[in-house]
Image: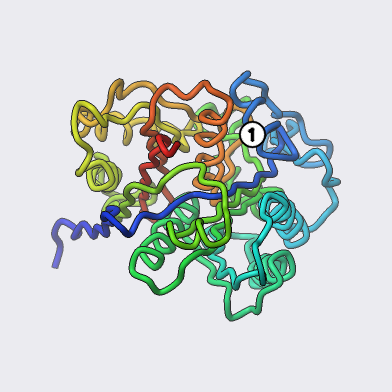
Amino acid sequence: MTGKPRLAVSTWHEAPGREVFLCAVGARTPVGLHRASSSAAVRAGISALTLHPVFVDKSGSSMQLANDPLLASHVSLAERMGQLLAAALAELTRQLEWSGRTPRLPCWVGMPEPRPGMTGDVVQACAHAATEALGITKESVRCVQHGHASGLMAMQMLAQQIAGGQVDLGVVVGVDSYHDADTLEWLDQGGQLMSSSNRNGFPPGEAAGACLLASGEAARRHRLPVLARVAAACTAVEPNPRCSLRLCVGEGLSAAVAGATGKQRLPHDAISTTYCDLNGERYRSEELVYTLLRTQGAFVDAHDYLCPASCWGDVGAASGPLFATLAVESRLRGYARGAWPLLWAGGEGGYRSAVVLALDVD
């Protein structure tokens, strides 16, 4: 039996008295070792894309990648991702001065989908790095393996738990790296690697981004800084992802964006800026075109979007938390174009996730 796949959607919106606040962020990217330097480099359009000293593509040319500046090319994928995650969490925790005993911090780790090179030891290394960095037990770590959408999906999961009273604060960290021979060969053979012979691919990167979310009561009790408010989130499943034989017309991304922006008071609270994971692949750009045709009424300018993959490469599961970092830095540095940034990303398997932040928290 054949038919149109069902579109699954999960939406969350803030409610009075149950607000969820973004209180700290951390980053480690190819263009900066911290959140401030990474954001400044992206704002300036600085690119870290370079020719790799070892990896070559199927045409014999050196692969163009965005490398972490401190990790040597021979470092294993498990160690790379563990160190990237630990660095982002270290920056996040340095910003916190707990009043009294350090609270338990449950952690959601956004990770790549299963793929060549992404073995069980990589997942375990990242989970272990999170426990070490936060001083928590392995039972307090939950891994979300849905690729690009993972970080934003984890933010939605944590926000729902905070708003529902299950926890009062927690950490989301997204981490990814394509710097593995099996992974890069798979991308190359599948036509996803950007090269001189393939302009429909993307430049692989590696990075990690971290966010601390808290309820209003927890933020006051622990005297946490308030950088933004998580206003809404939505996750949908695209019925026709890239690997599908059917044509993708952006149904999943449209549902995620529409769900996240559905309660904005227009035109006063229209989306002012968009941070997204466009990376040079044509199918992603075409998906966005269909989405904007359906949802453009929610934006001040639907075509005002920032896609930092041209600077730090495609950073996969780290995308969402890093987008939150860019939005927060734009507010702190005074160059935000408005109070309502939208963050969205989509995984290979079909998950599409979107989060609306509110920057007017002073």
**Splitting the image into 4 quarters, where does residue 205 fall?**
top right
Q: Residue at image x 62%, y 52%?
A: 176
Of residue 90 and residue 11, the one placed in the foreground of this image is: 90
Q: Is residue 109 left or right of residue 65?
A: left
- When the figure is inspected, residue 38 is found, relative to residue 115, above or below; the finding is above
Of residue 354 and residue 187, the one placed in the foreground of this image is: 354
- When the figure is inspected, residue 263 is found, relative to residue 39, above or below; the finding is below
Q: Residue at image x 50%, y 64%?
A: 169
Residue 99, percent from left and from top:
65, 63
**Splitting the image into 4 quarters, where does residue 294 fall?**
top left
Q: Is residue 181 visible?
A: no
Residue 286, percent from left and from top:
33, 31
Location of the N terminus by quadrant is bottom left
Q: Secondary structure at mark 1?
A: helix
The crowd level at tag 1 (other Cα within 10 Å; few <14, some 14-19, many 20+) is many
Q: Which residue is mark 1?
A: 312
Q: Is residue 280 left or right of residue 271?
A: right
Q: Is residue 174 left or right of residue 62?
A: left
Residue 263, percent from left and from top:
20, 43
Q: Residue at image x 51%, y 57%?
A: 219
Q: Amino acid at mark 1?
A: Trp
Of residue 170 and residue 192, the one placed in the foreground of this image is: 170
Location of the C terminus by quadrant is top left
- When the figure is inspected, residue 240 is found, relative to residue 128, above or below; the finding is above
